[in-house]
Amino acid sequence: MSLLDRLFSKEIQRRTGAHAIHIYIEDEKNARKRSRSLGSIALNEASKHTRITTKQEKISFLRRLDIRFPWLKLAAVLVIGIIAILNLCDVTVPRANDPFDKIKIAPMAHHVRVTERILTGKKLVALTFDDGPSNLTTPRLLDVLHEKDVHATFFMLGYMARANTDIVKRAKKEGHIIASHTMYHKNLPTLSYDGIKNEVNEANSILKNATGQNPALIRPPYGNINDNVRKIANTPLILWSVDTRDWESKNPQSIVSVAMSQVHDGAIILMHDIYSTSVDAIPNLVDTLRKNGYEFVTVPELAKIRGVNLTKGNIYYNFRP
Ligand code: NI
């Protein structure tokens, strides 16, 4: 790979969060430099890998141009190089909560066409994990999710997150959504207004310390909500539509069959990452869901694709089409 190739793919990798970048140059060697400037990029996010293909007709046009103006290719390489370097120095790229921001590529916009991950019209499901992070089970879950190329939504307890800050950071870095399950897993409707406020705010500040952002979603323990909870929560309240009851069965096969019997397009699946049996279930669950045509998204992605504007204090169980 040339230096320019490396700069180029590094930049795309930074902006997409893709695990790997494959560059396919489909023309002969001497078209390579030209193809960089006028090539078009198709970003295939379905597999989290980026594929870059060149446009043949543009290349032949350039070849004609090259014969007429032999100095053009040097100028083009210089310009692209400068643009690439300027883009690498760009620190104002939006890094919002919105997970879709990371797959919108801004640089070299007039040279590069990006096809966003096509998920419209597909069957979607969001895996969610509550009550962690645990240093005994969550790192292995993150390994499995990474290997399976799945992003999940973690509803973390404040006191668990405080004890395992490194795991919170790792989960965020690997593309998962860090959300709140409150501080100590109390039954919120039994608490006073101030009691609920403490449960919510303490967890928020711990998660903010670890990730740099307030959690964008809350799942109240046991799914129990009253008016005070809705008032105090500064975020949407996310419940679930598929309850694997993994904490009860502690049996990977049963977890998979319960999930498969209830799953539907737009489902939010409830699991707990503090049980090793739940982690054991994930490879088979992911494979089985994929075999049945499901794609994995995080909760905010699911809402966005289904055109739902998440509103604070509102309760969401699923995002059916
Ligand atoms: Ni819980």
Image (spheres, rainbow, N blue to C red):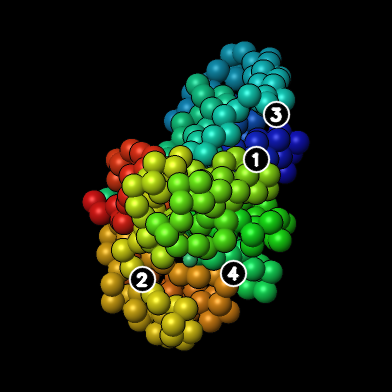
Indicate which label's residue lies in the foreground, 3 or 1: 1
Q: Earlier in the sequence, mark 3 or mark 1?
A: 3
Residue underneath mark 2: 243
Q: Secondary structure at mark 4?
A: helix
- Is 73 left, or right, of 151 in this rendering? right
Where is residue 11? Give x, y as percent: 65, 36
Identity of the residue drawn at 34% across and 52% down: 226
Viewer-closest of 314 and 63: 314
- How much space separates mark 2 and mark 3, taking CA atoms? 44 Å
Mark 1 or mark 4: name the one nearer the start of the chain.
4
Q: CA distance from mark 3 to mark 1?
A: 22 Å
Identify which amino acid the numbered label 1 is placed on.
Answer: Gly
Q: Secondary structure at mark 3?
A: helix
Q: Circle 1: is it few (<14), some (14-19), or many (20+) Cα within 10 Å?
A: few
Q: Which one is nearer the viewer's eye here, 80 or 116?
A: 116
Q: Which residue corresponds to the image point at 70% horizontal and 61% vertical from the top-left?
A: 164
Marks 1 and 2 in Cβ contact (< 8 Å): no
Q: What kind of residue is marked 4?
A: Leu
In the image, farthest residue toward the left: 321
Q: Earlier in the sequence, mark 4 or mark 3?
A: 3
Residue 57 visible, this angle: yes
Q: Position of residue 37 (x, y in %)?
A: 58, 26
Nearest to N terminus: mark 2 or mark 3: 3
Which residue in the protein does label 4 denote?
Answer: 141
Q: Is residue 129 above or below residue 304?
A: below
Disc 3: which residue: 88
Q: Which residue is mark 1?
A: 212
Answer with mark 4 or mark 2, whichever residue precedes in sequence.
4
Pointer 1 residue Cβ closer than 8 Å to ligand 1: no
Seen in the image, is 118 located left or right of residue 121? right
